[in-house]
Image (cartoon, rainbow, N blue to C red):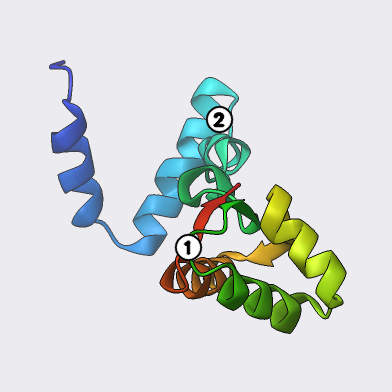
Amino acid sequence: MAKLKKDEFISSLKEMTILEINELVEAMKEEFGVDPSAVAVAAGPAPVEEATGPSKLDVVLTAPGANKVAVIKIIRDVTGLGLKESKAIADNGGNVKEQLATEEAEALKAKLEEAGATVELK
């Protein structure tokens, strides 16, 4: 008997009805002692987060730029911190906000960069 290639096997499966495929699976269980549907379930899909990247990001200020006053105002608005604490972040750099959703982090980064700051997402 000639050996079937994978493509030939798949094309012949496409021509079968669900009942015929079920009979084929049952015959494979009897012949080989293995449930082919269990093998497919055990492999499972790959984790989504590895493919898309992290879902939570930290917005880190590395430099305030020339317009430090505008950067301090933005930091105060988004964090609720006082003037002294916001100025300290602008002067020394550091985390502006932590564990933001990707879209929020990107929006905050754009807002700070528009004011002249240098920002990283981690």
Of all residues shown, which one is farthest toward the bottom? 77
Percent x, y of residue 35:
58, 35
Three-letter code, disc 2? Glu
Three-letter code, disc 1? Ala
Residue 30: image tag: 2
Q: Residue at x 61, y 47 (%)?
A: 122
Q: Residue at x 59, y 50 (%)?
A: 54
Q: Residue at x 53, y 46 (%)?
A: 45
Q: Is residue 72 above or below residue 7?
A: below
Secondary element type, mark 1: loop
* Mark found first going from the N terminus, 2 or 1: 2
Percent x, y of residue 100:
68, 66
Residue 20: image tag: none
Percent x, y of residue 102:
56, 64
Number of marks in the rendered image: 2
Pointer 1 residue: 66
Is the residue under label 1 in contact with that under label 2 (CB below 8 Å)? Answer: no
12 and 107: which one is in front? Answer: 107
